[in-house]
Image (tube, rainbow, N blue to C red):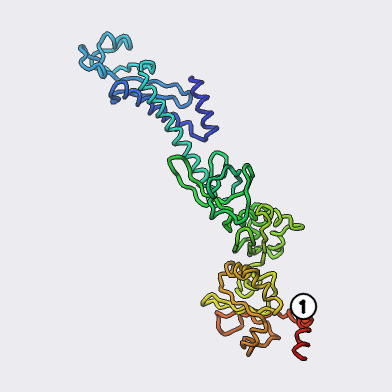
Amino acid sequence: MNKELLDALNLLEKEKGISKGVLLDAIENSLMQACKNHFGRTDNIRVVIDRETCDFEVYAEKTVVEEVTDPLTEISVPNAKSISKKAVPGDIVHVEIRSKEFGRIATTNAKNVILQKIREEERNVLCGKYSQLEREVVTGIVQRFYGRNITINLGRVEAILSEKEQVPGEILKPNEKIKVYILEVKDSTKGPKIVVSRTHPELVKRLFEAEVAEIQDGTVEIKAISREAGSRTKMAVWSNDENVDAVGACVGFNGVRVNAVVEELRGEKIDIISWDENPALLIENALNPAKVICVAAYEEDKSALVIVPDYQLSLAIGKEGQNARLAAKLTGYKIDIKSETQAREQGYFDGIDMETEYVGDSEDEDYDMEYDEDYDEDYGEEYDDAYAPYEEDDGE
């Protein structure tokens, strides 16, 4: 048994994940290459390697002849009998080739063949490993900065966090551990080229999948996510079990689950809302925390009209339009938000019985309106109090 070679191959297989069989093939090819460099031809040369013990033999098949004209393929009878006493002219005998006979150049070339194969296989193993992790979240260490890009050490490879995939305003420090989303894995001559992101909405989804057991077992589904990295994310969730509250499962006891995600995202605000097949209800939920009076959703052109109390208009739109913008991305609807006063002035309430709740009752199937019948009870008084001074001024 060639114990030294066997131990070396087992170590390479364990540390680099390269199959022992592949390495033995590389050794076989390197020996054949060495023979070709030494003898100039290999048509009658054979390399035999025992895959279990790693013992190997290199020999030339030579024909026994009375008079040798080609020493590379022929052997004289006396020499043949030293190998096999029964050898006679016309027989084929195996003449052992010792690697010590190879010249320095042939040995160096054989070594290079093995090293090249090891590098290729290592690259293929890494590329295959990280290709399977594409669209997944991994933990890396901030390595170094070059220009506006950052390299992230993922263990045996480095990934690129480009400027456009970095969260605006997020400060990363060398040797800091962060979670990144693998966008793409490409094979190259220098190994796998991995592009990662801190801004992709799927990063938030994968983080919740890791934190929420109900998402892992399929009880709760994440239906949609819209995100403005570093600022706010809206996520719509649905429960396949009526006894499980999807929003509550994602928030966790005392907010422990959502806070774990927020901490990883450096304080990014996350709104978790209930998914609904009714687009009007979904849009109402998506505009949380703003309260809505009614929603009219038009399936045909994916547009919606939302009416909110006057004092809720700025909250519904959000700072620089962010709340409305994220709600539109989440639902896929173009949302037009109007205050109650604007809606009344423009006649949107004409013909609508405000004592009735409308959810897809219109003859037009593409039209859904939802009226919040609790609005008057919960917010009407607050609304009247808030605007009382202005009404008195108008009265004067």
Q: Is residue 277 left or right of residue 122?
A: right
Residue type at mark 1: give it. Asp
Helix, strand or loop under label 1: helix
Q: Residues within 10 Å of mark 1 (few under 14, many from 20)?
A: few
Q: Is residue 172 left or right of residue 2?
A: right
Quadrant assignment, res 246: bottom right
Quadrant assignment, res 62: top left
Q: Is residue 394 left or right of residue 114?
A: right
Q: Residue at x 64, y 44 (%)?
A: 176
Which one is in front, 312 or 69?
Answer: 312
Q: Residue at x 55, y 47 (%)?
A: 150
| Rendering coords of residue 80 (x, y %) | 29, 12
Q: Residue at x 56, y 70 (%)?
A: 332
Which one is in front, 358 or 107?
Answer: 107
| Rendering coords of residue 255 (x, y %) | 74, 58
Which one is in front, 392 or 356?
Answer: 392
Q: What residue does disc 1 label? A: 378
Which one is in front, 348 or 90?
Answer: 348
| The C terminus, quarter of image | bottom right
| Rendering coords of residue 107 (x, y %) | 38, 22
Residue 37 in sight in this render: yes
